[in-house]
């Protein structure tokens, strides 16, 4: 959870108008290191979250399960070049837990 832009602006303006960083941290309930970082930034607007690059394509995994319903986890892992646990977790998140009755 990010701090509001308004609070960041008030804390930075408090310090720039002559207040101490330790006082500002007590008033606004943040650490002095946070205030130091805000003072170094040009823009206090929240930064957009970065998306993670995943090795495993969920659509390709789903199609692989449909094409090869009897494949073992280790065979799927070798096919996609990931660890067996990555296949297991992905299948659990896709609600494919049993190869017998999931795609019928």
Image (cartoon, rainbow, N blue to C red):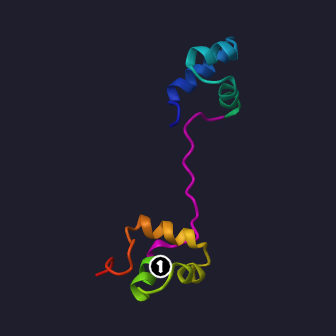
Q: Is residue 39 above or below residue 94?
A: above
Q: Is residue 57 above or below residue 37?
A: below
What residue appears at the point 53 percent right and 81 percent down from the top-left corner?
A: 76
Q: Position of residue 102 (x, y in %)?
A: 33, 76
Q: Is residue 11 above or below residue 60?
A: above
Q: Which SS type dominates the magenta stretch?
A: loop
Which quarter of the figure is the C terminus placed in? bottom left
What residue appears at the point 52 percent right and 35 percent down from the top-left corner?
A: 2
The residue tagged 1 is 60
Specify whether residue 46 is painted magenta.
yes
Q: Position of residue 59 (x, y in %)?
A: 44, 75
Q: Nearer the viewer, residue 63 or 28?
A: 63
Q: Secondary structure at mark 1?
A: helix
Q: Quadrant of residue 54?
A: bottom right
Q: Position of residue 75 (x, y in %)?
A: 55, 84
Left of 71 or right of it: where is 80? Answer: right
Q: Position of residue 32 (x, y in %)?
A: 68, 23
Specify whether residue 32 is painted magenta.
no
What residue appears at the point 48 percent right and 68 percent down from the top-left corner?
A: 90
Left of 69 or right of it: where is 79? Answer: right
- The crowding category of the residue bearing disc 1, from other C-alpha atoms within 10 Å (few below 14, some 14 to 19, many at least 20), is few
What residue appears at the point 57 percent right and 83 percent down from the top-left corner?
A: 79
Q: Quadrant of residue 85?
A: bottom right
Q: How many marks?
A: 1
Stretch of the chain drawn in magenta: 42-59
Left of 97 or right of it: where is 76? Answer: right
């Amino acid at each position: 959870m990010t701090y509001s832009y308004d609070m960041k602006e008030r804390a930075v303006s408090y310090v720039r108008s002559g207040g101490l960083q330790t006082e500002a941290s007590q008033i606004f309930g943040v650490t002095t290191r946070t205030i130091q970082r805000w003072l170094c930034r040009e823009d206090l607007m929240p930064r957009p979250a970065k998306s993670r690059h995943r090795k495993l394509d969920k659509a390709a995994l789903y199609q692989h399960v449909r094409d090869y319903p009897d494949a073992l986890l280790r065979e799927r892992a070798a096919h996609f070049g990931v660890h067996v646990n990555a296949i297991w977790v992905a299948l659990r998140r896709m609600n494919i837990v049993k190869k017998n009755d999931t795609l019928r």
